[in-house]
Image: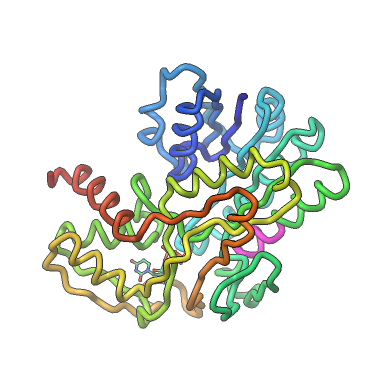
């Protein structure tokens, strides 16, 4: 099979490309190298069946051409990370809506399978202890552009499901919860690579807000495994799935965990949201997936323990900082 991965030079996309090549599939990566980077895919250059096209998912004719060349498409390309979305809101909305529209339209014409990467952000401010795929989405005001990412992703989901219903396009929607692991950069605000880099350099580990907010972190390898299994399950078509790990930790505990695991002397420094983000920033207190639908459908759920995930990130960042 030949698989198109949009955003394939990114953190998740490059791991997915590597895994699919290892499985013997052919892979075309489409990436504009904005947040993705050449380093992530340089290890794949020259491998049999691998091709990288530098371009944008907003380029409609390019997307058509590539979807046509492939058996199915995994659409990961997006403007991601709260920081980037708040710094460049209109660019993020355009990328996240038009890119998905282009991919779905091309797939509809050609009746090709598409996996659409959505996000746990769509659950918004809901205070439920864990989220089910059919739960209501509780989003904030449009005047707070923090919510524009969730709104764009929710629209992507609706569009995918509409194409499935009206045109029988085989779509699968995956709501990715906090995914982390080697190759993730802290540059766009992601917490674990940021904490590890701070700890390894004995700089303050910056906890935003009270630090009592919690998240569930999944190893990128487990996310890749889930996506690969989903695209091979006909029952998954037309469905939305949570994809993540349900081991929950507060950000305060994560900071201490990282400090202990690195043997760092860093202090843990609390920063008010107002010092980091634009005024009026709203935080999600908890974000835990219910994984029963995923497990029932693919016979698998992400389970790598946080300790192993943190170790893998430490090992990579130590090498990157020449601290080995
Ligand atoms: N966070 C933090 N310090 C940082 C970066 C992030 O305390 O240097 C917090 C952030 O406010 C959030 C959590 O860590 O509560 C996870 O942030 P991330 O951006 O990784 O993912 P999110 O769940 O917000 O999409």
Q: Tell me the residue at 63%/55% (across/down).
A: 296
Residue at 49% across, 38% down: 16
From the image, which quarter does the C terminus lie in?
top left
Residue at image position (81%, 47%) is: 163
The residue at the point 22 percent across, 74 percent down is 268
**Quadrant hosting ligand 1:** bottom left
Residue 276 on image: x %, y %: 38, 72
Q: Which residues are magenta?
A: 149-155
For residue 95, say whether it is visible.
Answer: no
Between 153 and 308, the one lying in front of the other is 308
- Tell me: residue 115, above or below residue 147: above
Residue 89 location in percent, x, y? Answer: 56, 60
Q: Residue furthest right?
A: 166
Give the camera-side residue of 233 and 35: 233
User: Considering only vertical position in the picture, is 299 above or below 305?
Assistant: above
Q: Is residue 277 toward the left or the right of residue 111 in the image?
A: left
Residue 104 is situated, as x and y percent measured from the top left of the image, at 74, 42
């Amino acid at each position: 099979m030949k698989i198109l991965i949009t955003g394939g030079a990114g953190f998740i996309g490059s791991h997915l490309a590597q895994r699919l090549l290892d499985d013997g599939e052919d892979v075309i990566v489409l990436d504009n190298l904005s947040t993705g980077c050449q380093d992530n895919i340089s290890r794949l250059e020259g491998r049999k069946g691998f091709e990288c096209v530098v371009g944008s998912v907003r380029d409609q004719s390019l997307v058509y051409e590539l979807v046509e060349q492939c058996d199915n498409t995994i659409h990961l390309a997006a403007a991601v990370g709260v920081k980037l979305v708040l710094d460049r809101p209109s660019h993020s909305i355009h990328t996240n809506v038009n890119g998905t529209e282009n991919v779905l339209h091309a797939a509809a014409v050609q009746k090709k399978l598409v996996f659409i990467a959505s996000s746990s952000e769509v659950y918004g401010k809901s205070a439920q202890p864990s989220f089910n795929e059919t739960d209501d989405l509780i989003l904030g005001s449009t005047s707070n552009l923090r919510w524009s990412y969730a709104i764009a992703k929710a629209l992507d989901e609706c569009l995918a499901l509409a194409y499935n219903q009206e045109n029988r396009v085989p779509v699968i929607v995956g709501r990715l919860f906090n995914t982390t692991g080697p190759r993730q950069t802290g540059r766009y605000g992601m917490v674990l690579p940021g904490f590890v880099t701070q700890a390894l350099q004995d700089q303050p580990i910056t906890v935003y807000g009270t630090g009592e907010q919690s998240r569930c972190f999944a190893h990128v390898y487990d996310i890749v495994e889930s996506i690969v299994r989903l695209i091979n399950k006909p029952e998954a078509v037309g469905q939305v799935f949570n994809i993540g790990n349900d081991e929950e930790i507060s950000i305060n505990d994560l900071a201490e965990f990282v400090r202990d695991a690195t043997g760092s002397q860093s202090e843990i420094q609390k920063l008010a949201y107002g010092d980091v983000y634009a005024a009026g920033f709203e935080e999600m207190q908890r974000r835990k997936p219910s994984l029963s639908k995923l497990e029932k459908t693919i016979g698998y759920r992400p389970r790598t323990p946080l300790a192993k995930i943190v170790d893998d990130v430490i090992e990579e960042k130590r090498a990157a900082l020449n601290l080995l």
